[in-house]
Image (spheres, rainbow, N blue to C red):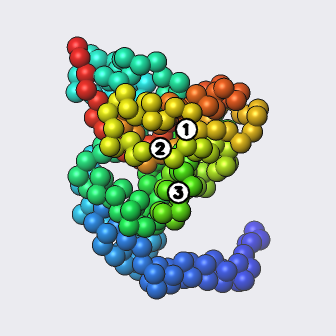
Amino acid sequence: MLEYKLPERYFQIIIMKFYKQNFMHLLFPPRCPFCDGVLFSSVFLPPQLICGGCRRKVEYVKEPVCKKCGKPLEDERVEYCYDCARHVRAFTQGKALWVYQGAVKESIYRFKYHGKQEYAQYYGKELVRVYGEWIKRRKVEAIVPIPLSRRRLSQRGFNQAERIASEVGRRTGIPVYRHLLVRVRDTRAQKELNHEERKNNLKKAFKTTENKVQLKHILLIDDIYTTGSTMDEAAIELKQSGAENIYCLSVSIGKGYQEV
């Protein structure tokens, strides 16, 4: 019986890539997205994206959740959160990864306002691990990040939603349309407003760069989902331009108020 041996050069290339990746992590070690501690790697182990102690600090969204936006609910007899029970949504369905509190809240603050862009790698990895099959079943054709205004983008230096979307796109193979949706109005920060003010604040805030969107199923991505006003307005614009189903995926989400 003949034995087939792989060329020695093949193993050399694999080993070089392995050591190069780990060497870069030793020179520029990533930081844990929750405690911001340095993650040192061994050349014999794959690079880590989170420290072991922080895995227990976060609360993943789990059932029961709102059937429309994905907010966690306290009562499994309730189908929709307070907001979705009272407002018709433009998007088809939404999901989120973590509850917006504690270590998650602090992580996203550093990510957005302290330039910790490397956090997006772990955010995207976990989003795909938890919701990869959900995305696949929705037959998503394109990923669209929620855009920032020119002023805010200039101040921050990057769009946090775009960084997350890029990671999700890289891991799923779905193209990311970074410029399909633009923010044409420099709106106030949503966290400063109540529900009605948020809704009015975002009216006509988004515009598609194409008159006719030749996509049926689009996934919108953002870092935080609160009342859903941002996702709704973005979905309205995309649907008016030809899209059929808009799905939403967020890194974090608040808990939903409800009435039985």
Which residue shows up at 37% across the image and 71% down it?
A: 31
80 or 47, nearer to the observer: 80
The residues tagged by marks 1 and 3 sit, at their Cα atoms, a distance apart of 14 Å
The residue type indicated by label 2 comes to Thr
The residue type indicated by label 3 comes to Arg
Q: In terms of sequence position, does the residue under pointer 2 or pointer 1 come before the other?
A: 2
Residue 260: percent from left, percent from top: 23, 14
Residue 111: percent from left, percent from top: 40, 61
The residue indicated by pointer 1 is 205
Q: Secondary structure at mark 2?
A: loop
The residue type indicated by label 1 comes to Ala
Residue 110 versus residue 141 in the image, above or below: below
Which residue shows up at 25% across the image and 21% down it?
A: 258
* The N terminus sits in image quarter: bottom right
Can see residue 79? yes
- The quarter of the picture where residue 69 lies is top left
Residue 117 versus residue 175 in the image, above or below: below
Residue 85 versus residue 112 in the image, above or below: above
Dot 1: within a 10 Å radius of its alpha carbon, few (fewer than 14), some, or many (20 or more) residues? some
Q: In terms of sequence position, does the residue under pointer 1 or pointer 3 come before the other?
A: 3
The residue indicated by pointer 2 is 187
**Residue 151 numbered mark, or none:** 3
Dot 3: within a 10 Å radius of its alpha carbon, few (fewer than 14), some, or many (20 or more) residues? few
Q: Is residue 171 left or right of residue 241?
A: left
